[in-house]
Amino acid sequence: MHFYGNKLAVMIALAGAIVSPPAKAQVFELQNSTDDISFTERGWLQIVNGGSTITQVSNTYLQLTTTDLADQAGLFTRNPVTGASSGLDYPALDRTSGYSLSFDLRLDAETHVSDNRAGLSVIVISSDLQGIELGFWEDAIFAYDTDGSTGFTRGETVNRQVVTPFPGSTESTLYDLVVAGSAYSLFANDELVLEGSLRDYSGFPGTGPLNLVNPYDKPDLIFIGDDTSQAGSAFLLGDVVLTIPEPSGLMALGVLALGVMTSRRTRETRVM
């Protein structure tokens, strides 16, 4: 079992208080790679256009490929047009009490034609529409900036090896995206790699017919996939776990930290 001292320290600092965490948190397995239930059976909304493909690998891992950069594909927990739940039920994503999204990911390839786009994105939108979108390149991870009207640009960035380290590698990375207060922190295999302020992307005008597709003004939304026509990727996605603390004032972030620690499976190196 890994113990996440660095994550706990960051969350306590964000809370601005020394806390003694109680012994439980709400843990929602949005995908469990060991229970032979597919992503769509579990309730994820799958959207694919063009020649993109989303394929289940033995009902455990999901393989997404967007080889044509103009194509897009991904998984939503909320409908990006209506905001309705896809079938995955969990409480509101309250950034005040905090929450954590953990996901097991193997990026095999990523290509982009703009320095402000990535072929793999992870989006979390809190109940008040404050959230963060992270873009993954083969050699960097960054947060998206926007003024809500003129488009998205690359914000804070960390240069690190994201794609599998050598051809044929089966090793994946276990990421924890922690939202607390007005900030986010991203951990990769227990190491803090990127942090910054949450954004309000809700002014985005939308895309598609009548500009109805807009994930950024849908509260409590989670997205994993390729949402741009200027980049593409190929990746495998395994376990996805959402951790939300029981409401308890200043103790909430302590619960969140404990929940992240106790909800994770024992693993030295995950292989897909």
Image: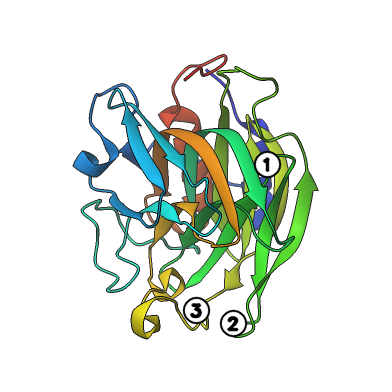
Label drawn at residue 202: 3
CB atoms at circles 3 and 2 under 8 Å apart?
A: yes
Please state which amino acid type lies under the numbered disc 1. Ala
Which residue is at the front of the view, 28 or 229? 229
Q: Residue at x 40, y 82 (%)?
A: 211
Q: Which residue is mark 1?
A: 9
Q: Residue at x 56, y 44 (%)?
A: 233
Please state which amino acid type lies under the numbered disc 2. Gly
Instruction: Rate crowding at label 1 as few (under 14), some (14 to 19) or many (20 or more) other CA atoms within 10 Å.
Output: some
Closer to the chain start, of discs 3 and 2, is: 2
> Based on the displayed image, in which of its 4 quarters is residue 182 positioned?
bottom right
- The kind of secondary structure element at disc 1 is helix
Estimate the x, y position of residue 244 in percent, counting from the top left: 40, 49
Estimate the x, y position of residue 120 in percent, counting from the top left: 56, 49
Q: CA distance from mark 1 to mark 3?
A: 31 Å
Q: Is residue 200 visible?
A: yes
- The kind of secondary structure element at disc 2 is loop
Label drawn at residue 148: 2
Q: Residue at x 36, y 85 (%)?
A: 210
- The kind of secondary structure element at disc 3 is loop
Q: CA distance from mark 3 to mark 2?
A: 7 Å
